[in-house]
Amino acid sequence: MAFFLVLLSGAIALVVIGAIVDGMPYLLSIGVLLLIAAVLYLLVGSVSRSRRRPAH
């Protein structure tokens, strides 16, 4: 969960910096990609946790 929060905070920071600072749209795109990666990481983790439960 800590890794997800680090990814999420880094993505938000890059999106904000890329949106505010003129001439740095690459930071905005990297932030969006990092945000997508964080959400996918959270989804994969939740799916793998639900599959680990034994089916009795």
Image: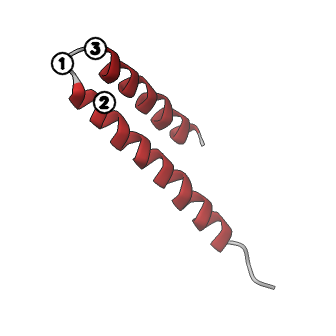
Q: Secondary structure at mark 1?
A: loop
**Residue under the image location 41 percent in, 32 percent down:** 11
**Residue under the image location 22 percent in, 30 percent down:** 26
Q: Secondary structure at mark 3?
A: loop
Residue type, numbered disc 2: Leu
The location of residue 24, given as percent across then percent down, is: 21, 22
- Position above or below: 54 against 11: below
Q: What label sits on residue 28 in the rendered view? A: 2
Q: CA distance from mark 3 to mark 1?
A: 6 Å
Quadrant holding the C terminus: bottom right
Left or right of 51? Residue 5 is left
Left or right of 21? Residue 43 is right
Which residue is identified by label 1?
23
Residue type, numbered disc 3: Val
- Position above or below: 23 against 49: above
The location of residue 22, given as percent across then percent down, is: 23, 15
